[in-house]
Image (tube, coloured by chain):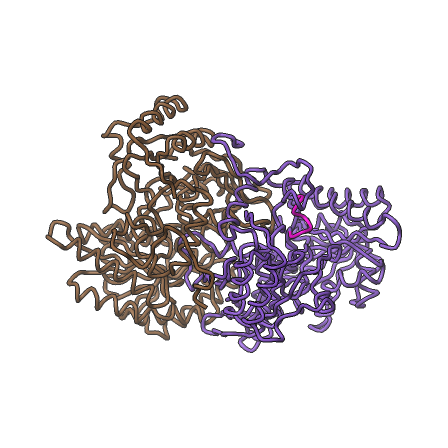
Chain colours: A brown, B purple
């Protein structure tokens, strides 16, 4: 992409322009203030930016980006900083454009069940505002109380209920986006089909590399008439995994099928006390929702399948409060790991659901070989694993071994016919693993699309796609520049 | 895009290479043979290509495209040629790459409910092959018996049941695509989420401008356990329109809500004899599917809403054969227009569902002003209108007036907050109307993304995006070249 390199003089000029364009309290340059922005949820990487700006409107964001563009200063957008793949990691000597002050609900259209919000509104706030209308916003990442819709759009966030309801891309109807030169684009509309190239679908999940989304219109859904939840205990992980496969094979589409293993349960019970069985080797939290008759029928079938696969107990929460507590336990699983381990890496790979048992067996084997503990808590229904590799950073070399194990687990998922990432994104963390999943030709196509939006490489550079700088100067399997694809050099 | 212009010598060289790369019967150059390829379902435009090639495999397509690319010959992919917006209209002196011989089912994966096929397999054949497994392919354009999945991917095709089930983009899991230089890309996978820029969503609906899709993996759905269908007759179009709005507002998601007006019914009854009431001013065909209990409950609510809005009769088909006949009538509506008019234009606009009545009233008024008849048959549930402007090409100036009226109707839809196209695409037909919906900045972004795949402008040129050549040399509202967007020249 870009060739020009910014100098300190450029940065000073950019800073003057930013100061002129924004209120005084919207520009942070004090090192103590900047420390908050050094990393996101991927805590292993820290980079101090030169400046942080906190705009309040689309036009302020456009002014910030235009100033960066004029002076060739790279910039990174940031929501709540909860992302787990380092998508909001700053660029050294670059600008962080924090969107935390853009928290207005701009429009609630109850007739058409949609809401237009600024990107700093949290995922949970959308449902709170929709609740009086009997509506809610479906995608539910575990961090939903703090993570922002802007971050959800960047990462195409999922959550426990995405098994039935789909990911963020299925619920975003329109966005306003500032591109790398400060231009304001609007994509999406009220229409059933989208015409022309579907840039909205491209923008959702692009991890902040195509521009900065400054307004989001989301679809709201009617709250389901009925919800049924159960927790099934198993004496073996394989029994739980087989149960999941058989539920899906039976044509049932539960709202959620979550699995937790013994170590994950132990952490949650120390942290939240959700009433989960600490004697079980694995539990499934299974939920169905919709029409009451269908829920009852599906629920009965699920109970039979659990029993047929050796469930030692099936527990049905007595009331909404108990159901909420179970979900609170599940959603606090990552945060609870501190109860049993000083440090951990969260992995996020996807495998075909039918391979749950062999892949989980192999992860356990790899953990034994590495002499590390791995806790599993994940979206079993769609094969989206979240192995948590536990370690103690104070013990020499343990962090490094844990990271190696975590990366090996991601690559195991790819080799099993799955994916490097289910919902946490590629970001900084996995850019160098992309050639494991995509050919040089596929990556070059992604790179060209990105350059169509950001020819100078200023917008969240170094994320998602591997670059020699990021992945080491050694000749790797992928060399994105220069792009030269010979006529027939394909894979046909 | 490209600057080099192909010469007759280039074409001759290209032809020699194509002849060497393909079997003898796969290259057509006889003018009589070429005539078949002069137009698609948008019959008002005819262009004779220089050559037609009929490859059988991804590698043959790649060889054809690479030969065109070497000699800077533009090319256009073609499936069954049923598209209604001229997306498969040839380029004069260009090559048509016909995919009709690529009709193999490559893989049926019953465990994961998916099928991988070549692009020339028809939409209906996919469901036929899936039927023994109790599965089907959901998107159902009216032309499904003849139209191909490759064309469906290009146009992001819809159909009557897309109200509940979504469009092609919601059902395509992966594609293999040959890009404009003959490179073979693969996008999509088995994973719940897609990582990196979501090029698959970009490719679906790009109307053949980003490359040629040579393999498609689609998701299959279990056949619904129950289906209930009714036909409601109304004495006024407004009553039928209000019924649609109230059904959706009640939170019911029918599988389909189709509307036909008196003129459309008359044509269908002359053609197919589907048993529809020719005395009604409008009918609704409403279908619900899914779990039997939910169907019954929704169906009862729908009947009440129909009655409350003055339905003069509600007819429930006695058996599957009668239900099939009703759908045959609906799907043959365009083809039946020949029964009542020598010629017609099909329009394809979308409006917010809540504006059905005023927009239909205005269309009737515009028809009276133009002294032309307009029949309406459309997907009422998602506001996707298909006004059919009837005319007789033998009467001087009537074709021109009909085309003007049809374009005015499309622009009325945009002005009502809707879209130029619901499911038929932009193609040749509506490229010049795109500036009515998109700003210069939005169109320039689309143009840059397209150039990322096809920098030389060889792949279905002149379609979708307006170009001075296509839209006349007069200074129009959109000038795509050169692309120069000033820093803050946005719309914020």
Q: Position of residue A97 (x, y in %)?
A: 37, 34
Horizontal side of residue A156 vs B131, given as left or right: left
Number of numbered markers: 0
**Closer to the camera, B203 or B458?**
B458
Q: Is residue B255 magenta?
A: no
**Closer to the camera, B485 or A235?**
B485
Judge whether residue A188 can be spotted in this image.
yes
Q: Quadrant of residue A384?
A: bottom left
Q: Position of residue B386 (x, y in %)?
A: 72, 53
Residue drawn at the location 43% of the way across and 38% of the way down: A180
Q: Position of residue A183 (x, y in %)?
A: 49, 35
Horizontal side of residue A153 vs A269, given as left or right: right
Q: Position of residue A395 (x, y in %)?
A: 11, 52
Horizontal side of residue B51 vs A348, given as left or right: right
Q: Quadrant of residue A268?
A: bottom left
**Closer to the camera, B476 or A123?**
B476
- Outermost residue on the right side: it is B395
**Closer to the camera, B436 or A127?**
B436
- Outermost residue on the front side: it is B9
- Outermost residue on the bottom side: it is B132
Judge whether residue B218 can be spotted in this image.
no
Stretch in magenta: B427-433
């Amino acid at each position: 992409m870009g060739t020009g390199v910014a100098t300190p003089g450029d940065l000073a000029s950019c800073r003057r322009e930013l100061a002129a364009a924004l209120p005084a309290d919207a520009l942070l340059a004090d090192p103590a203030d900047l420390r908050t922005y050094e990393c996101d949820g991927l805590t292993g990487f820290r980079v101090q930016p030169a400046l942080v700006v906190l705009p309040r409107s689309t036009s302020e964001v456009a002014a910030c980006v235009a100033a960066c563009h004029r002076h060739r200063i790279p910039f990174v957008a940031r929501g709540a900083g909860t992302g787990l793949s380092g998508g909001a990691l700053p660029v050294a000597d670059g600008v962080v454009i924090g969107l935390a002050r853009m928290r207005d609900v701009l429009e609630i259209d109850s007739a058409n069940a949609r809401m237009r919000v600024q990107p700093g509104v949290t995922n949970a706030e959308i449902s709170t505002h929709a609740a009086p209308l009997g509506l809610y916003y479906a995608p539910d990442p575990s961090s939903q109380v703090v993570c922002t819709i802007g971050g959800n759009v960047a990462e195409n966030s999922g959550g426990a209920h995405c098994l039935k309801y789909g990911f963020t891309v299925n619920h975003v109807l329109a966005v306003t986006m500032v591109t790398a030169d400060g231009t304001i684009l609007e994509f999406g509309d009220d229409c059933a089909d989208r015409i022309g190239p579907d840039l909205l679908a491209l923008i959702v999940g692009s991890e902040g590399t195509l521009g900065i989304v400054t307004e989001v219109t989301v679809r709201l859904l009617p709250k389901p008439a009925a919800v049924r939840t159960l927790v099934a205990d198993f004496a073996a992980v394989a029994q739980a995994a087989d149960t999941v496969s058989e539920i899906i094979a039976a044509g049932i589409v539960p709202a959620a099928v979550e699995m937790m293993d013994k170590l994950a349960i132990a952490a949650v019970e120390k942290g939240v006390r959700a009433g989960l069985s600490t004697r079980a080797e694995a539990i499934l939290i299974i939920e169905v929702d919709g029409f009451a008759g269908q829920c009852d029928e599906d629920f009965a079938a699920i109970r039979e399948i659990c029993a047929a696969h050796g469930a030692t107990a099936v527990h049905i929460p007595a009331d909404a409060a108990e159901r909420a507590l179970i979900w609170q336990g599940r959603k606090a699983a990552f945060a609870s790991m501190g109860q049993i381990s000083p440090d951990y890496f969260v992995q996020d790979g996807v495998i075909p659901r039918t391979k749950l048992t062999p892949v989980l067996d192999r992860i356990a084997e790899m953990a034994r070989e590495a002499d590390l503990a791995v806790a599993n808590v994940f979206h079993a229904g769609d094969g989206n694993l979240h192995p948590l590799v536990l370690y103690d950073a104070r013990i020499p070399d343990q962090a490094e071994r844990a990271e190696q194990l975590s990366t090996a687990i991601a690559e195991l998922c790819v080799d099993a016919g799955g994916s490097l990432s289910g919902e946490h994104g590629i970001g900084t963390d996995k850019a160098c693993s992309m050639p494991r999943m995509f050919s040089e030709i596929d990556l070059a196509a992604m790179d060209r699309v990105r350059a169509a939006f950001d020819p100078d490489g200023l917008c969240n550079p170094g994320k998602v796609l591997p670059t020699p700088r990021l992945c080491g100067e050694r000749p790797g399997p992928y060399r994105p520049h220069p792009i030269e694809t010979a006529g027939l050099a394909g894979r046909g």
